[in-house]
Image: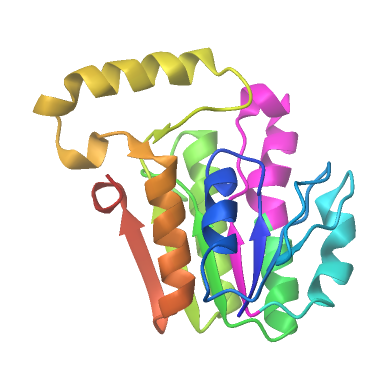
Amino acid sequence: MKLLLLGATGLVGSRTLPLALSNPAFSEVIAPTRTPLAPNDRLVNPTGSRLDELVPPLMSYRPDAVICALGTTQAKAGTKEAFRYVDYELPVAIGKAAHRAGVETYAIVTAMGASTQSMSFYYRTKGEVERDILDIGFRSLTICQPSLIGGERNEARRAEGAALTVLRLLAPILPRKFHVNPAEAIAAALLDAVVVAKTGCRRIYSEEMN
């Protein structure tokens, strides 16, 4: 199976990549990034400053499944528009291109609380990407909805770091769905989802990724 992995340098994607490369289910992992990754015999690593410009070449590799681990924050992106480009426009555009190319399996990371009716721009965007990816019509679609994601990041996010600390301290008294989800657990869930590729849409909730 050929896997297209989006967001291979992010918190979840960087945990997904080595797991995919060591999994015999995948003959090839296509991971587009801005800067080159460490070489691997089963890794195809197209590079470019804008992922949307790589979409046609990516489909020429004929992937069998897509994992979308793209994600940012409005603070990091700088504007609502830039945030939406990463968290909505890219996942949907690549999803549509992949479906047209014959890909039947797609898995994406969104967030617990994602809803098109949310007052929060962040959670509303997550809800909209879920809705529009579902409308594409993949035979097998998996939506992972983690709580806060735990793991070492390349960049500092002070607010998230403080929230993670609080959640870990309160873990003994909080419902499981509010526990921190390790990035490695989310990565494993994504890979299992595309390997098994159950027909229909499945949501994997926070409490299933602890």
Q: Residue at x 63, y 28 (%)?
A: 74
Q: Residue at x 39, y 81 (%)?
A: 198
Left or right: residue 4 versus residue 26 is right
Q: How many marks?
A: 0
Q: Is 100 a magenta residue?
A: no
Left or right: residue 63 versus residue 129 is right
Q: Position of residue 174 (x, y in %)?
A: 14, 30
Q: Position of residue 208 (x, y in %)?
A: 26, 53
Q: Residue at x 55, y 80 (%)?
A: 138
* Part of the protein shown in magenta: 64-90
Q: Looking at the image, is 75 positioned above or below residue 63?
A: above
Q: Looking at the image, is 9 positioned above or below residue 99?
A: above
The quadrant in which the C terminus is found is top left
Q: Is 72 a magenta residue?
A: yes
* Quadrant hosting residue 143: bottom left
Give the color scheme: rainbow, by chain, secondary structure or one colour.
rainbow
Q: Residue at x 72, y 58 (%)?
A: 40
Q: Evaluate whether residue 71 shows in this view.
A: yes
Q: Evaluate whether residue 114 shows in this view.
A: no
Q: Position of residue 199 (x, y in %)?
A: 41, 84
Which residue, as the protein is rendered here, is positioned at the far front?
Answer: 41
Nearer to the camera, 77 or 28: 28
Left or right: residue 93 versus residue 71 is right
Q: Looking at the image, is 170 positioned above or below residue 28?
A: above
Nearer to the camera, 94 or 195: 195
Which residue, as the protein is rendered here, is positioned at the far left?
Answer: 173
The quadrant in which the N terminus is found is bottom right
Q: Looking at the image, is 128 positioned above or below residue 210?
A: below
Nearer to the camera, 160 or 74: 160
